[in-house]
Image (tube, rainbow, N blue to C red):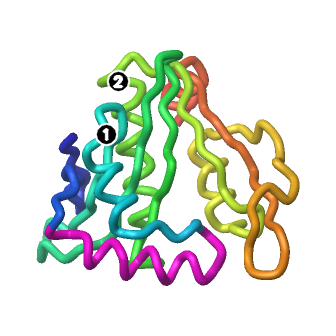
Amino acid sequence: MFLETKRLKLVDTDRAYLDDIMRVEEIESKKGYVTLWDRKEHLNAIKKDRTYHISIFSKKDHHFVGYLLINLDDNKNMEIMRINLQVQNKGYGMEVLKAIIEYAFISTDTNRLWLDVREHNQRAIYLYKKLGFVEEGVLREAVKFKDGFLSVVVLSILKKEYKMWNKNR
């Protein structure tokens, strides 16, 4: 997969990017935003047929910005499994999400784009809803974290909702 936005390039992850990915992964796992994967899990994801492991770079200086994982299934669902950005507060998250939403509904036959997000990540939830995602529900205390559990919010956007949202913006 290869996508470009105004400021970013999204490219298939190469093994050479794993050190950068692992640094971002470790920071976000400590905050409880993702479950820490090791190198082997990332390598396996890179090799999978229906999973896209995508690295994100700044077009300006080719600086590593982050990565994302997307999974496709046989029911025309596309799951955003993970978005991890090492650069915050620059609007990159919105830029990446807009590109993925457009890719899903214009370049593929995806009917439902979905993700789950840790409930305490209110900033991300706000962004997803701003881009048209609808909250489907909460998986209560679904993820073990440190000495307790975290709840997970499931959100999705359907192709027909995207068309309506895109028409009205």
In the displayed structure, 164 sits above or below 52; it is above
Q: Residue at x 33, y 72 (%)?
A: 21
Which class describes the residues within 10 Å of circle 1: few (<14), some (14-19), or many (20+)? Answer: few
Q: Are marks 2 and 1 in contact (CB under 8 Å)?
A: no
- Nearer mark to the viewer, of 2 and 1: 1
Q: What stretch is highlighted in magenta?
A: 16-33
**Mark 1 belongs to which amino acid?**
Lys
**Mark 2 belongs to which amino acid?**
Ile
Q: Which residue is drawn at 24% across and 60% down?
A: 8
User: What numbered label is drawn on residue 106?
Assistant: 2
Q: Residue at x 41, y 43 (%)?
A: 70
Majority SS type along the magenta span: helix
In the displayed structure, 53 sits above or below 37; it is above
Q: Residue at x 53, y 16 (%)?
A: 75
In the displayed structure, 128 sits above or below 60; it is above
Q: Report the residue marked by disc 1.
A: 48
As for residue 56 lying within the magenta part, the answer is no
User: What numbered label is drawn on residue 98?
Assistant: none
